Structures are given as structure tokens and as C-alpha cells.
Amino acid sequence: MTDTTTDDVTDWGPFGRPLFDKDLAKALARVAVLDVGSNSVRMVVFDGAARSPAYFFNEKVMAGLGAGLSETGRLNPKGRERALSAIKRFAALAESMGALPLTAVATAAAREAEDGPEFQEEVLRETGVKLHVIDGAEEARLSAQGVLLGWPGSYGLVCDIGGSSMELAVIAEGKVGNRLTSPLGPLKLRDIKGKKQLKEHIKSIVKGLHDQMGNETGKRLFLVGGSWRAIARVDMERRGYPMTVLHEYRMTSRAISTTADYIGAANLDDLRGRCSISSDRMALVPIAVQVLREVVKTFKPKDITVSSYGIREGLLYQQMPQELRDRDPLIEACRYAEAKDSRLPGFGKVMYDFVTPLFPNVSWQKKRLIKAAALLHDVSWRAHPDYRDEVAFENVTRANLGGLKHSERVFVGLSLFHRYKNKREGSRFEPLFGLLTEQEIKEAEILGKAMRLGAMLWLKDDELPGELVWKPKKRELELRLTEHAHALWGEVPASRFNSLANSLSAIDKNIEFVD
């Protein structure tokens, strides 16, 4: 595939067509991608904001296509049957969803097996789906680009584990650098007999990868792949972590070691049930965690982050013009949600301008969270009034959003919670509030109450109803209402203004009607 950062692209890779037109379409309409891996077959149908597409459909089958490959040199016969059956189903679904043509890529098992070409022909003959078999370097690059789709500007080392291989790729300044592939997939490793032999085999290969990668020690490590996500889910269970969203979940090197010991001592059937991990996946976790432990020990990452984005998302990123790549995926997703679900699309910008005077010295990272909250402040209006606070919180903390850490999810969610409700004490979400500092909780409360007030001053989508003036040193809060907003003032807005002033610990508060 060619680099599609310019408009003169003629090779559209496996898609065979452009996905993003020249005016950078705001929406991506039902693009289906099939990923035929060594362990699983998954189809994702993307839809929604072009820069931050959502999952209209997402289903996988643990086919085990590469089971026994290292011994036989051929695809697993039962795995072939299961994979072909899954592809037939996915092709039919893609047609019914209006998501054709179905774009399909296959990785290590299909490229290494001697009957891989035969399987490709069978799939084409039986389903009409053409499998694009990619090599290890391309697999590494696409996985890394998937990480960049979620975190533009990220840097570090991307480690993608599949059933039969593990890839490494360096990312920096929005680009993919050195990349390598290795035979460290757990399906392949489980054919090695003896614990000592397995450990030495893993150690030797990881050392070789480190030597080839050069000076990549001490950087952030991004983990891509189902086995890594399963390990992260076990880590959450071990810690009693209050959230189960795996994307952007962070672990330390010490946590990896502790969780590896935890898995080694656990009853896997019991652990699988508690963590909602499939039996096929759980069978590979004890091997995968040995690989991860060695990777962490050798590369010594400064922190470890789980990415739910990989090859499929990387295929989309491949086609994005640079201007679109440079946009903030969080803000783009929120703009799309506002345009689709709010009562007055465009008022989110007005709301942002209204509330920002209360946060004069915050970082750019916090400003983007404030902007996200402002854009989302009205998208939950269809919920029953008694539950809007909960629905608004859950929409953010459970949504498939890129560019958002777990603590940031909770911050935006809590601010939207307070957009509909003054008090949070006694909420069933209190365990999640513990991911924030006391200062962040207070900031989210202030933001939410400011939006609660601003929502009462509803004018046009391009007209600011007034101006909040906050003098933190003097603890003075003033609301200056424009002439058009005079008639909107009443008992309810006044009550909400007083609630905001109380949260700010304002000593002096004043309303000014501006002509």
C-alpha cells in the first residue's frame, strides 16, 4: 500500500477505493473490514465521525486458523472450516448492512502456511471475498497506524501480538519508523515442549528484537492484540479496578510482573469466568503473559498502555489525508455526536465560550476536555429526566472514544453528570470518581454547573447569551447578560447561578443586564 497523505493517491490498498474525499467528509459511512488472523476472524463495520469512526458492528470468531502451524506447516483443518464459516456470515452481514465491498486482510497464518494460497482461493470461490495477505512488516505498520488513529502525535513502541506472530514498530511525530516481526504468537509458542525451553526461546527472540530495534528502551509501550487485552482485563480484576474499558488502560512494569504471578497461581476456569474471557483466549494467556513479561523486562518501558485500535483502524488511517490525521479524534467524535443528537447543533461552541472564563489558567489538555463536555452537553436529552445524569455519565465513560485517558473519561462524564444534577453523593458511580483528584472533581462540578446554567440561556447557535466574569483572587463571580437574554432570566436560572457560585466558593456574586 502507498502512503496516502496527499490527494493524488491512485493505489487504495485492500479497499480498492478512496474512503475520504477531498473536502474531508465529516462522516464515514459503513466501511467493513475483515481481519483474518491466526487465532481469530473479526469483522468491524466503521461508521460515524471520519477522524474518529465508531463501531457500527464488531464481531469475532476464535477460529484458531494457525493452531499447530509450526508442526504441520499447514492451516488447522478445523480452523479453516470455522474461519470459512465466519467469513461467509460476515460477507452476508456486510451485504445486508450496505457495507460492501468487504475489505479483508489476512496475517501470519495465511502467509506462512503452505496451503495459505489454497485457502485464499477457497474463500474467494465460496464467499466472493478476496483476502489480501500482508507480510509481517506491513502488519506492524498498520497496527502502529491504528495506534496513531487514537493518539495523534504519540511516540513509543507498538507491540502487536497475534496468534502466530508478534510485531514491533516505532512511532514518533505521527509516523511509523523501524518495524519487525517475530514468531512469538502464543499459538505457535504452545507447540514448544518444556517450561524451561519455552522461557529460553522467548528470552532469546526478545533479546534479538531489542538488538535490532536499537535504542528503543525506556519509551512508552502500546499493547495491541487480544491476548494483551485479556491480560489487561485480568490486571483490572486483580486490582479491583472500577472500569472495564480496555482502551487506554495503563499498567506499570511491576503490575505486569505481579499479574503474571497472579495468572500462574490462578484457577484459569474461575479467572476466565470472572473476567469474561473466552476459553480459547484464556488458554493462550499463560503463554502470552510470559512474552509480555520478557518484553517489559528487556525494553524497560516508562509506562504501558493498552490500545484497542490496531490493523483495522490502521487501514483507515492509511487513507486519511494529513489534514484529517492532524485533527483531534476526541473533538471530532464529540462534534459528530452533537450534530447527530443534540437539540441545537452548534450551540456547543457557544457553551464552550460561555464556560471557559471560569478556567483561565488550565492546560491545553484540560481545555480539550472542557470543549468535549460542551459539545456533548445536550446529546442525552432524550433520556428520562430522572436518569439524564446517569445516561450522560455512562455515554462518555463507556463510549468508544479515542484520545481519552480513563481519568479524562471520568472528568468529562462527571461534568456532564453535574450538567443535570447538583449533587453526586450516593451515586452508584462513586468508585469511578476515585480516578480523579479532589481538585479535578471540583473542576468537573464547576464545569457541569456552569453548563447547567448556560443551558437555561438558550439562544441561537451562534449567539452568546452572556458572559461569566470570575475573579478567583477576590472570589467574585459576575454574570453579564446580553439584551436578547434578559427575558430568559428567572427563578430557575437564578438558582443555578447561585449553585455555581457556591461551588466556586464565591464571596461576591452579581447579575448585570447589559443593553
Image: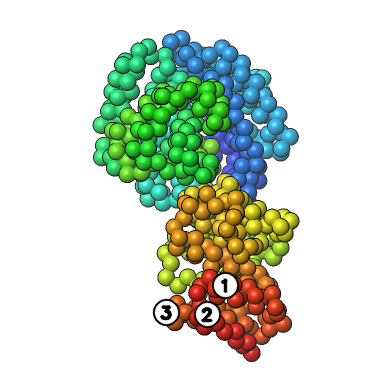
Vertical side of 384 occupied by 501: above or below: below
- The kind of secondary structure element at disc 2 is strand
Q: Would you name the residue on which mark 1 appears?
A: 500
Secondary structure beneath dot 3 equals loop
For label 3, count other residues whose C-alpha is less than 10 Å away and answer few (under 14), some (14-19) or many (20+). Answer: few
Q: Where's residue 355, x and y in %?
A: 55, 71
Of the numbered discs in the image, which one, if any, rests on residue 477? Answer: 2
Residue 294 in sight in this render: yes
- Report the side of 305 relative to 101 (left or right): left
Residue annotated with mark 3:
473
Residue shown at 47% from the left, 13% from the top = 68
Evaluate whether residue 144 shows in this view.
Answer: no
Q: Point out residue 155 in the picture as x, y percentages from the top left corner.
A: 37, 47
Up-down: is 270 above or below 236? above
Distance between the Cα atoms at labels 3 and 1?
A: 17 Å
Height in image: 192 above or below 455? above
Q: CA distance from mark 2 to mark 3?
A: 11 Å
Q: Are the residues at dot 2 and dot 1 in contact (C-beta closer than 8 Å)?
A: yes
Q: Residue at x 55, y 78 (%)?
A: 468
Q: Using the image as rendered, state which of residue 2 and residue 304 is in the foreground.
A: 304
Amino acid at dot 2: Leu
Going from N to C along the chain, the mark reached first, 3 or 1, is 3
Q: Earlier in the sequence, mark 2 or mark 1?
A: 2
